[in-house]
Amino acid sequence: MGGAFITRVQDQCRPGIFMDAHLLRTYGFVLVAALGYAVATIGMKLASGNWTLLAFGLLIFGFFAATQSEVILMREVDLGVLYLLIIAVETVVVLTYAWFIGEGLGPRDALGGLLVLSGLAVISH
C-alpha cells in the first residue's frame, strides 16, 4: 500500500514474526474499514430506491465496521495517510460494484479513481 506507511509501522515493531503480524493486522483493519464504507455505500444505493430492512442493516453494519476499524488504526497511523489508504481501497471496491450492477464507469469515473490512487502513490514515497 504506502511505502511511508509501511516504514512508519515497521519502525514501531520489533523485527521478526511480530513485525509481519503487526503489518498484516494493520492492513486487515484498513481493508475492514474500506469494505465497511463500501457496504454502507451499497446500503445507501439500495435505500435510494426504497428503504428496506436490508438497506438499513447494510448501512448500520458498514458504518459500525468502518468506525471500529478506524478507531483502532488511529492509535498507530497518521490521519492523512490512514484516510488515503482507506479511500483508495474503498474507491476500487465501490467502482467495481458500480460496474458489476451495470452503472458503467465512464472516462471521468475512471480518471477520478486513478487520481485517488495516484495521490496514495505520491504520499507513500
Image (cartoon, helix red, strand yellow):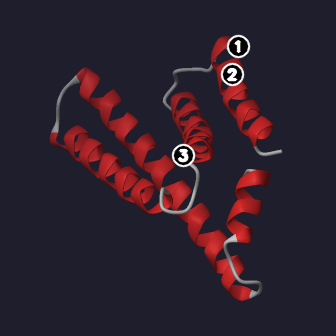
Q: Which residue is mark 3?
A: 79
Secondary element at image label 1: helix
Q: Position of residue 2 (x, y in %)?
A: 74, 50
CB contact under 8 Å: marks 1 and 2: yes
Q: Nearer the viewer, residue 11 or 62?
A: 11
Eye-nearest disc, 3 or 2: 3
Q: Nearer the viewer, residue 2 or 108?
A: 2
How many neighbours does mark 1 have within 10 angstroms: few (below 14), some (14-19), or many (20 or more)? few
Which residue is painted at 68% across and 65% down in the image?
Answer: 9
Amino acid bearing label 2:
Ala
How many neighbours does mark 3 have within 10 angstroms: few (below 14), some (14-19), or many (20 or more)? few
Furthest-right residue in this view: 125
How many neighbours does mark 2 have within 10 angstroms: few (below 14), some (14-19), or many (20 or more)? few
Looking at the image, is 108 positioned above or below residue 50?
above
Q: Earlier in the sequence, mark 3 or mark 2?
A: 3
Q: Position of residue 63 (x, y in %)?
A: 32, 46
Secondary element at image label 2: helix
Disc number placed over residue 107 in the picture, else none? 1
Looking at the image, is 22 positioned above or below residue 15?
above
Q: What quarter of the picture does the C terminus occupy?
A: top right
Occupied quadrant, residue 106: top right
Position of 60 compared to 93: left or right? left
Which residue is painted at 77% across and 45% down in the image?
Answer: 124
Position of 111 compared to 81: left or right? right
Which residue is painted at 59% across and 41% down in the image?
Answer: 80
As measured in the structure, the alpha-carbon distance from the residue carrying label 1 to the one carrying label 2 is 5 Å
Which residue is painted at 78% across and 39% down in the image?
Answer: 121
Disc number placed over residue 110 in the picture, else none? 2
Amino acid bearing label 3:
Leu
